[in-house]
């Protein structure tokens, strides 16, 4: 048995949404290292320029496209351009996402809608337009970036938790509806990862101490550390490769053990 071949992504095209930096960039870097051609999208020129340079610094010829994943016409255009440029999408990572940390009864409905739009409706839109091409190819891998908040709630993240909980069920439904076409749709549920999205939770306090939430997460994580975006590379390559052809509808939590642990006694 050729185990290396099972994990190889040679000849495959991967679209990672929102992969100019953060978790998306790390996952795209890992998929490229396994042999995939990388396509990614972002919304701003500055981020695009910086991202292309960052990919080049990693020796990766990433193909960057401007697209807001909440805008269906831009997603259709994105998918068509990748089809023309690279020959269609074998691997889709629905990574683009935002969070707004506001107590629910103080949250504007427009804010709630924006989070759900980007974190749940957009993965639906992108998958809806990528799956037909995967059916034609006879195979496909979809990885939805879920969250601890696909399983747990906490103060101020009602919209995010609702969206990420819904994304877990969208993952299971795509598995159910398209598994017969040799399409596997799974989720990755990162724990607390040190990226721009969580930077406010790790800010050093005026007195030089660690942010209270930072200390809280350390106490809730058996690994006693925040995750790094690169911790997600191995799980992503596994779920993007033939090694996971009979894994479907699963959310793989990459959380250092948070979900298994009651937390260190103060
Ligand atoms: P991040 O650093 O804030 O990056 C988010 C990315 O999404 C950015 O590239 C951003 O691009 C893009 N994006 C946002 N809205 C978009 C839109 N409408 N259209 C296109 N791109 C859009 O966040 P991250 O920490 O890397 O998180 C990436 C994913 O992992 C998210 O889905 C997040 O919910 C999830 N996650 C993160 C953690 C964590 O602890 N960090 C844990 C679990 C899950 P712009 O620059 O254009 O805004
Ligand atoms: C928060 C954090 C979390 C992480 C991640 C955990 O405010 O609680 O931002 O939501 O981003 O989703 O898995």
Image (spheres, helix red, strand yellow):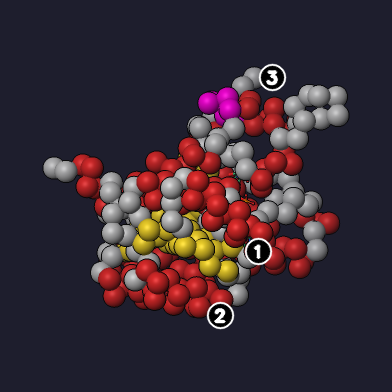
Residue at screen point 53% across, 41% down: 229
Point out the tag, 2 or 3, that comes first from the N-terminus. Answer: 2
| Front-most of residues 18 and 143 | 18
Point out the tag, 2 or 1, that comes first from the N-terminus. Answer: 1
State if disc 1 and disc 2 touch (CB < 8 Å): no
What main secondary structure does the magenta stretch of the protein show? loop
Give the crowd class for mark 2: few <14, some 14-19, many >=20 residues within 10 Å.
few
Magenta stretch containing residue 223, yes or no?
A: yes
Q: Quadrant of the N terminus?
A: top left
Quadrant where ligand 1 appears: bottom right
Q: Quadrant of the C terminus?
A: top right
Q: Which residue is mark 3?
A: 266
Residue at screen point 60% across, 75% down: 71
Q: From this viewpoint, which residue is outermost toward the top?
A: 266
- The x, y position of residue 15, in whole percent, is 44, 62
The answer to whether residue 62 is visible is yes
Q: Where is 226 relative to 106, above or below?
A: above
Is the CB of mark 1 within 8 Å of ligand 1? yes
Q: Which residue is mark 2?
A: 73
The answer to whether residue 166 is visible is no
Chain part drawn in magenta: 220-225
- The x, y position of residue 37, in whole percent, is 38, 58
| Quadrant position of residue 192 | top right
| Front-most of residues 182 and 42 | 42
Q: Which mark is residue 44?
A: 1
């Amino acid at each position: 048995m050729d185990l290396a071949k099972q994990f190889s992504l040679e000849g495959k095209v991967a679209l990672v949404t929102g992969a100019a930096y953060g978790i998306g960039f790390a996952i795209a870097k890992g998929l490229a290292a396994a042999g995939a051609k990388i396509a990614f999208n972002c919304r701003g020129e500055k981020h695009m320029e910086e991202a292309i340079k960052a990919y080049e610094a990693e020796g990766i010829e990433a193909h960057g496209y401007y697209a807001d994943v909440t805008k269906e016409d831009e997603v259709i255009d994105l998918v068509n351009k990748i089809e023309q440029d690279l020959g269609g999408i074998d691997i889709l990572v629905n990574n683009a996402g935002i969070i707004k940390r506001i107590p629910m009864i103080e949250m504007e409905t427009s804010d709630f809608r924006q989070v759900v739009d980007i974190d749940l409706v957009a993965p639906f839109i992108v998958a809806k337009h990528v799956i037909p091409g995967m059916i034609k190819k006879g195979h496909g891998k979809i990885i939805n970036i879920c969250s601890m908040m696909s399983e747990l709630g906490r103060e101020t993240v009602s919209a995010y938790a609702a969206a990420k909980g819904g994304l877990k069920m969208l993952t299971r439904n795509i598995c159910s509806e398209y598994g017969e076409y040799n399409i596997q749709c799974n989720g990755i549920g990162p724990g607390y990862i040190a990226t721009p999205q969580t930077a406010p939770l790790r800010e050093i306090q005026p007195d030089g101490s660690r942010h209270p939430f930072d200390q809280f997460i350390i106490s809730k994580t058996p690994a006693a550390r925040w995750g790094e975006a690169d911790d997600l590379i191995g799980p992503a390559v596994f779920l993007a490769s033939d090694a996971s052809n009979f894994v479907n509808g699963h959310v793989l939590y990459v959380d250092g053990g948070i979900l298994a642990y009651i937390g260190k006694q103060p």
